[in-house]
Image (cartoon, rainbow, N blue to C red):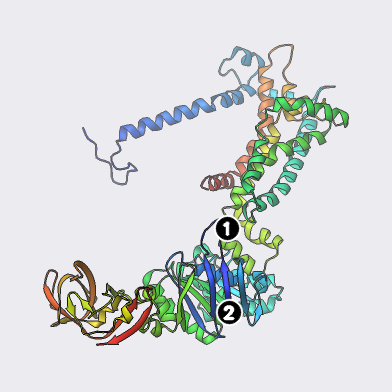
């Protein structure tokens, strides 16, 4: 039996209702599968330890695990220390990255330097190197300059990691600014700084916000350099999470709680910035 | 203002975009630069603005050589085709932007913006952002932004192309009135020859970077310098047919009574639609299409000229009695132009 679309229905021409519903269900199922590990972790973080090891679904939920991880024991890394370290490292490195990326993007998008394509490629080529291949020379020099276990070395490394991405993205957002607008500003007599401030940044703002957020996320989650170049004192959040892996047994609930706490700041920041970020990311995609 | 052998060659291209342009623009004139795409008219305008460097020659404004002066120091204002309004500023801030950059104090700035807003009927929109304005309103804001600066020169790069046809005609006349009132030298670029003819004190026709002719519109219409100008100016276009290099001039096989053969160099004959009279005459033709515009009628015909079928256009009075497929006779009464084999117009004959 052919069903005619009801008045005001959202079916396209030639689309059958059955297909649309089936595709919708499939989309939800795949979405659920994707989010399942995270959802399970959240659930586990509220369980008791017995519950967690047995992997049963629900036997009384408690927030005790969260308070467990928040209190530090003597000699191990505390949440407060790790959080502060991460925060400082991430904020400082991202700020410096953005301060460097904006002028670079200007030179590559608006007043193009000769061979700008080669320059761009060079920047992104620095990310071709596997991180593991770089650790040995970095460690040697870090030790030589007494930087092991300091926040400084991580800040420097995160700047190096994020800068190519930031330049690449910011450049593409700057090139969205219509050429005629820049020419109009030039004719109106704006200085270089005012051009950036009054004309370019307001238009590229969503993109810049998206770039900064991405840099924040990458720096926050960075694990390899953090673990190789740190002792307990200057450790970051990823290390703190690992610190909850006990050799005495599987304390999955506690680990889950720790993981969720580690993710939370970034999730919240992304949530707050999501409108701008989507707009920013899709803007760049059209170029 | 003056272009003195100004040349611009984009790197990597074989021919200059603007080739040794020589133009002198007196104070207060509205000069239109017109030509097809790629003719170099926008490039020439941008050279005047300082947005394109000169490879050769000079640009002078007010007698001073400004060839190497930055755009902001040239005392010019430009209206772009896409208006280039600052999207994050409202109308008042857009118009006052240049003044703010130049350090004009706030009181004077506001006053000048309000004056111009009044002139252009923009007062109710001063608080709005460009995205909340219609195309016509945005165009006026772009104009206002230029006017408020009281520059020596206005440069306009196809400012009306993004408007719909009716608004374009209306704004055209307002623009001309405004320019006459403000009496500021204006250089206006367009690809639309109707705009050029109705707006300019003088019109400069460009083709492939070379100036073809710079004259008052009527001179361009009645005495075009060469074949290109003859065919470009006027709508519908001039009828252009091959002419024998010697002997009597034949159109559609009929002798139309012109003996001049330009010393054996005759190559093309041209006549405008209004010179073709449908009725009795020596030329046999067949009607293809009748375009009835209400006040005038354009009849598209086919004649047998020089062994091939050629199309010509005739202008007729409304109402017109013929229709497609009819066989008619044509006579020529009006200005007939003769062009030589270098495409230059050498003489015009009144029949």
Dot 1 corresponds to which residue? Answer: B11
Q: Position of residue A201 (x, y in %)?
A: 64, 55
Give residue A87's mark: none
Q: Mark 2 lies on which chain?
A: B
Q: Residue at image x 64%, y 13%?
A: A50
Q: Residue at image x 61%, y 46%?
A: A117
Between disc 2 and disc 1, the foreground one is: 1
Label 1 environment density (alpha carbons within 10 Å; few <14, some 14–19, many ≥20) = few
Using residue B43 as the reference point, say whether residue B295 is left or right of it: left
Q: Position of residue B58 (x, y in %)?
A: 62, 74
N-terminal-most mark, 2 or 1: 2
Residue B196 position by quadrant? bottom left
Dot 2 corresponds to which residue? Answer: B2
Residue B129 position by quadrant? bottom right
Q: Position of residue A212 (x, y in %)?
A: 66, 44
Q: Nearer the viewer, residue A109 or B333?
A: B333
């Amino acid at each position: 039996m052919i069903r005619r679309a009801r008045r005001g229905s959202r079916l396209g021409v030639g689309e059958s209702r059955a297909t649309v519903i089936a595709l919708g269900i499939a989309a939800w199922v795949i979405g659920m599968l994707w989010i399942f590990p995270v959802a399970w972790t959240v659930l586990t973080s509220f369980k008791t330890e017995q519950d967690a090891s047995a992997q049963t679904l629900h036997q009384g939920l408690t927030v005790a695990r969260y308070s467990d991880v928040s209190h530090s024991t003597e000699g191990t890394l505390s949440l407060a220390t790790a959080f502060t370290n991460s925060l400082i490292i991430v904020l400082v490195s991202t700020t410096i990255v953005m301060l460097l990326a904006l002028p670079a993007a200007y030179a590559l998008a608006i007043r193009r330097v000769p061979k700008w394509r080669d320059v761009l490629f060079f920047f992104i080529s620095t990310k071709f190197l596997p991180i593991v291949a770089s650790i040995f020379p970095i460690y040697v020099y870090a030790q030589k300059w007494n930087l092991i276990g300091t926040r400084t070395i991580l800040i420097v490394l995160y700047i190096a990691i994020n800068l190519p991405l930031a330049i690449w993205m910011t450049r593409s957002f700057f090139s969205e600014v219509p050429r005629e607008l820049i020419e109009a500003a030039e004719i109106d007599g704006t200085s270089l700084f005012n051009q950036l401030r009054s004309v370019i940044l307001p238009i590229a703002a969503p993109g810049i916000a998206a770039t900064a957020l991405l840099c924040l996320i990458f720096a926050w989650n960075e694990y390899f350099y953090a673990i190789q170049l740190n002792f307990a004192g200057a450790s970051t959040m990823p290390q703190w999470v690992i610190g909850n892996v006990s050799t005495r047994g599987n304390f999955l609930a506690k680990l889950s709680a720790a993981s969720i706490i580690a993710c939370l700041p970034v999730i919240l920041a992304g949530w707050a910035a999501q409108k701008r970020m989507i707009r920013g990311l899709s803007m760049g995609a059209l170029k | 203002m003056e272009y003195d052998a100004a040349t611009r060659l984009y790197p990597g291209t074989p021919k200059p975009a603007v080739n040794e342009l020589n133009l002198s623009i007196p104070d207060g004139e509205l000069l239109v630069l017109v030509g097809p795409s790629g003719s170099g008219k926008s490039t020439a305008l941008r050279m005047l603005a300082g947005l394109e460097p000169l490879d050769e020659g000079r640009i002078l404004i007010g007698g001073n050589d400004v060839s190497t002066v930055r755009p902001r120091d040239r005392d010019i204002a430009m209206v772009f085709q896409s208006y280039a309004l600052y999207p994050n500023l409202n109308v008042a801030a857009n118009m006052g932007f240049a003044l703010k950059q130049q350090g004009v104090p706030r009181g004077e700035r506001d006053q000048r913006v309000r004056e111009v807003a009044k002139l252009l009927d923009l007062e109710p929109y001063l608080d709005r952002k460009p995205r909340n304005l219609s195309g016509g309103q945005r165009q006026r804001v772009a104009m206002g932004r230029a006017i408020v600066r009281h520059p020596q020169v206005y440069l306009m790069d196809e400012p009306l192309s993004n408007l719909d046809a009716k608004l374009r005609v209306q704004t055209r006349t307002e623009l001309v009135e405004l320019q006459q009132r403000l009496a500021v030298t204006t250089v206006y670029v367009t690809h639309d020859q109707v705009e050029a003819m109705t707006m300019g004190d003088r019109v400069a026709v460009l083709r492939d970077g070379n100036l073809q002719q710079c004259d008052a519109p009527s001179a361009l219409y009645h005495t075009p310098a060469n074949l290109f100008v003859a065919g470009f100016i006027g709508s519908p276009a001039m009828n252009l047919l091959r002419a024998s290099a010697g002997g009597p001039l034949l159109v559609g096989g009929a002798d139309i009574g012109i003996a001049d053969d330009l010393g054996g160099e005759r190559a093309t004959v041209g006549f405008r639609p209004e010179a073709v009279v449908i009725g009795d005459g020596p030329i046999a033709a067949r009607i293809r299409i009748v375009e009835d515009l209400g006040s005038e009628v354009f009849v598209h015909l086919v004649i047998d000229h020089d062994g091939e079928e050629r199309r010509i256009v005739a202008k007729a009075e409304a109402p017109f009695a013929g229709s497609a497929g009819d066989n008619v006779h044509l006579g020529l009464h009006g200005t007939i132009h003769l062009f030589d084999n270098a495409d230059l117009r050498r003489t015009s004959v009144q029949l």
